[in-house]
């Protein structure tokens, strides 16, 4: 028997670029280097176990 799970999360990201993070989209960065932070937390877990 295999269990299936569904996770819901809240995520936040930030970088030092002027508009959008170029390194995430394979584009040049604003300042020549990328400083990027990404954090998240699981807010809900649902078991989709087969019965």
Image (spheres, helix red, strand yellow):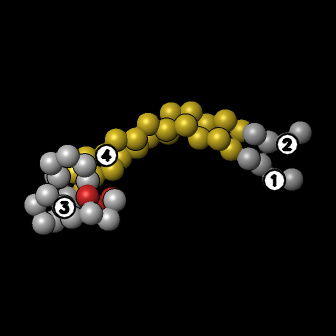
**For mark 1, what is the residue?**
2
Q: Please name which of the two marks, 4 or 3, marks the residue nearer to the observer.
A: 3
Q: Are marks 1 and 2 in contact (CB under 8 Å)?
A: yes
Residue at (85%, 42%) from the top-left corner? 50
Secondary structure type for disc 1: loop
How far apart are the alpha carbons under marks 3 and 1?
44 Å
Secondary structure type for disc 3: loop
Q: Which mark is residue 29?
A: 3
Place of residue 6 in the rendered image (x, y in percent of width and height, measured from the top left): 65, 41
Along the polypeptide, which appears first: circle 1 or circle 2? Answer: 1
Q: Please name which of the two marks, 4 or 1, marks the residue nearer to the observer.
A: 4
Query: Which quadrant of the rendered structure holds the C terminus?
Result: top right
Along the polypeptide, which appears first: circle 3 or circle 1? Answer: 1
Q: Are marks 4 and 3 in contact (CB under 8 Å)?
A: no
- Toward the left, the furthest residue is 31
Q: Which mark is residue 50?
A: 2
Secondary structure type for disc 4: strand
Residue at (15%, 48%) from the top-left corner? 18
Along the polypeptide, which appears first: circle 2 or circle 4? Answer: 4
Res 5 quadrant in image: top right
How far apart are the alpha carbons under marks 3 and 2?
47 Å
């Amino acid at each position: 028997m295999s269990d299936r799970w569904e996770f819901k999360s809240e995520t936040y990201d930030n970088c030092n670029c002027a508009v959008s993070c170029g390194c995430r989209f394979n584009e040049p960065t604003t300042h020549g280097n990328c400083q990027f932070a990404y954090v998240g937390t699981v807010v809900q877990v649902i078991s989709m176990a087969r019965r």
